Image (cartoon, rainbow, N blue to C red):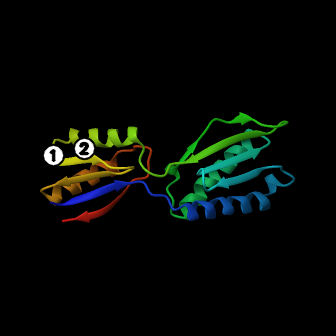
């Protein structure tokens, strides 16, 4: 029976490279000269922390992070930015969580969308991924096409397509 897996796998080394590219941008850009902006990446907790003086610089860093992610072939949807909070002194801080894997709520939403297609396929949630199986490979390809068309807020990859 043909099957495939829906996953969200993020290469943390590429995320680290994107953060380093953004740090270099901060060091060389004119409007960040004499800025106390900092960008740190914690690989273990999968969090990026941005600290800067004002909201304009925060937006510039967010935009550059998204561009760096795209250049490194990491989908910017993998970033879950938190709220901007005041930090020490007159600084602003934001924590950006990197989403790696499919969380339970998102997996349930994916299964619900697949079942709503009324195709003869089965979807099972399995440890941070969703396995879809069916008798016809065309049905599986229809599921892939539907999920690519939907914006679920997650970068999804479709792997292990076996017929």
Q: Where is residue 60 in the image (x, y as percent from the top left)?
A: 69, 49
Horizontally, residue 120 falls left or right of residue 82, namely left
Reply above or below: 146 against 18: above
* Residue at horizontal 60 percent and vertical 50 percent from the top: 45
- In what quadrant of the picture does the N terminus appear? bottom left
**Is tag 1's residue or tag 2's residue first in the polypeptide sequence?**
2
Report which residue position mark 1 lands on: 119
* Residue at horizontal 75 percent and vertical 45 percent from the top: 51
Q: Nearer the viewer, residue 160 or 50?
A: 160
Reply above or below: 4 against 121: below
Horizontally, residue 154 falls left or right of residue 45, namely left
Badge number at residue 140: none
Horizontally, residue 12 falls left or right of residue 151, namely right
Q: Position of residue 43 (x, y in %)?
A: 61, 56
Q: Nearer the viewer, residue 37 or 160?
A: 160
* Residue at horizontal 77 percent and vertical 45 percent from the top: 52
Q: Are marks 1 and 2 in contact (CB under 8 Å)?
A: yes
Q: Secondary structure under badge 1?
A: loop
Disc 2: CA contacts within 10 A as few (<14), some (14-19) or many (>=20): many
Quarter of the image where one finds residue 158: bottom left
Report which residue position mark 2 lands on: 114
Q: Nearer the viewer, residue 44 or 100?
A: 44
Q: Position of residue 48 (x, y in %)?
A: 64, 50
Q: Position of residue 96 (x, y in %)?
A: 61, 45
Q: Nearer the viewer, residue 134 or 148?
A: 134
- In what quadrant of the picture does the C terminus appear? bottom left
Horizontally, residue 50 falls left or right of residue 47, namely right
* Residue at horizontal 57 percent and vertical 64 percent from the top: 14
Q: Secondary structure under badge 2?
A: helix
Give the CA distance from mark 1 to mark 2.
Answer: 8 Å
């Amino acid at each position: 029976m043909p099957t495939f897996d829906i996953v969200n796998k993020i290469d943390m080394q590429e995320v680290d490279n994107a953060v380093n590219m953004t740090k270099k941008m901060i060091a060389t850009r004119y409007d960040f000269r004499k800025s106390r902006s900092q960008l740190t990446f914690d690989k273990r907790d999968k969090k990026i922390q941005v600290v800067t003086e004002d909201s304009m610089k925060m937006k510039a860093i967010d935009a550059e992070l998204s561009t760096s992610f795209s250049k490194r072939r990491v989908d910017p949807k993998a970033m879950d930015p938190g709220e901007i909070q005041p930090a020490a002194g007159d600084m602003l801080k934001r924590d950006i969580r990197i989403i790696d894997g499919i969380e339970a709520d998102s997996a349930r939403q994916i299964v619900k969308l697949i079942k709503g297609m009324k195709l003869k396929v089965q979807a099972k949630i399995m440890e941070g991924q969703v396995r879809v199986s069916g008798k016809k490979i065309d049905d599986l390809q229809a599921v892939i096409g539907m999920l690519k068309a939907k914006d679920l807020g997650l970068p999804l990859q479709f792997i292990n397509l076996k017929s």
